[in-house]
Amino acid sequence: MIVLVLWQYASIRELVPEYLLPSPLKLAFIGWDFMTGALDLTPYSGTFFKHFSASVGRVAAGFLIASALGIILGYSSGRSRTFNELVNPILNGVKAVPGIGWLPVALVWFGVGQKTTVFLISLAAFFPVYMNTCMGAMRVPEIYIKSARMMGASKSRIWTTVIIPASIDSLLAGLRLAMGVSWAYLVLGEITGVAEGLGAVMMDGRMLGHVDVVIMTMILIAVLGWLCDCMLTGIFRLSSKIGGRHYVL
């Protein structure tokens, strides 16, 4: 709150040029107009839900693909030394290339649009899920598994009652990290020229000189990322109450 007050004061006193950093009050009006279309302040008036739905769809698709692959490969790598030695060097090489380095390749493979954005999100979000799941699976005490075997548990039973519950905290941490990364890479994918999406609004705003639209969209993306993290955390806490387990979130 103090930051907002100082920011607004600096804008009123013209200590910071309006074209570089619009005031919080102006950004609030721009955001309200973006969502409702009531003020008709910018070319994006009333278009929020169109761009929001496009971006959420891409984030959801990329996050789900990354989560599925990360969990499957993470558990496989964490519980099999042979699989780990085979897959880890390849994945480490892929991880070493920054996301923006994959952008030209993605554009060649998929062209401008939905597929490129989903690919970049999936690629970036995969590694937090994979690494956390792998480490969680590796750290399951062998005494737990041996005890389950002595009690006659089958392999599938050991997985569902020992390995997954013992590594779930690490997995959930990876999913939360992946959700944040998904929103970050959404912007990278959408500034390549897609017609709809919050990243596309940012890019158009930059080209048209609407710094207020760019900053307002940045704030909206940050809020949406935070809300998704809260939703993910809430789902896990609810499931922990139903299942009688305590997750560290």
Image (spheres, helix red, strand yellow):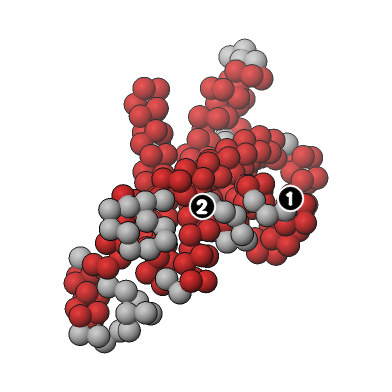
Amino acid of disc 1:
Phe
Residue 195 appears in which quarter of the rendering? bottom right
Q: Residue at x 51, y 58 (%)?
A: 199
Amino acid of disc 2:
Gly
Q: Residue at x 72, y 57 (%)?
A: 107
How many marks can you see?
2
Residue 83 appears in which quarter of the rendering? top right
Residue 210 appears in which quarter of the rendering? bottom left
Q: Which residue is mark 2?
A: 197
The answer to whether residue 63 of the structure is visible from this angle is no
- In the rendering, at what x and y percent does residue 183 appear? 50, 53
Q: Determine the CA span between mark 1 and mark 2.
A: 18 Å
Q: Is residue 101 left or right of residue 178?
A: right
Residue 56 tag number? none
- In the rendering, at what x and y percent does residue 222 appear? 40, 57
Q: Is residue 48 above or below residue 241?
A: below
Q: Which residue is mark 1?
A: 110
- In the rendering, at what x and y percent does residue 22 appear? 32, 74
Q: Nearer the viewer, residue 205 or 58?
A: 205
* Local SS, label 1: helix
Q: Residue at x 35, y 29 (%)?
A: 238
Q: Residue at x 33, y 63 (%)?
A: 41
Q: Check the picture and name the quadrant holding the C terminus.
A: top left
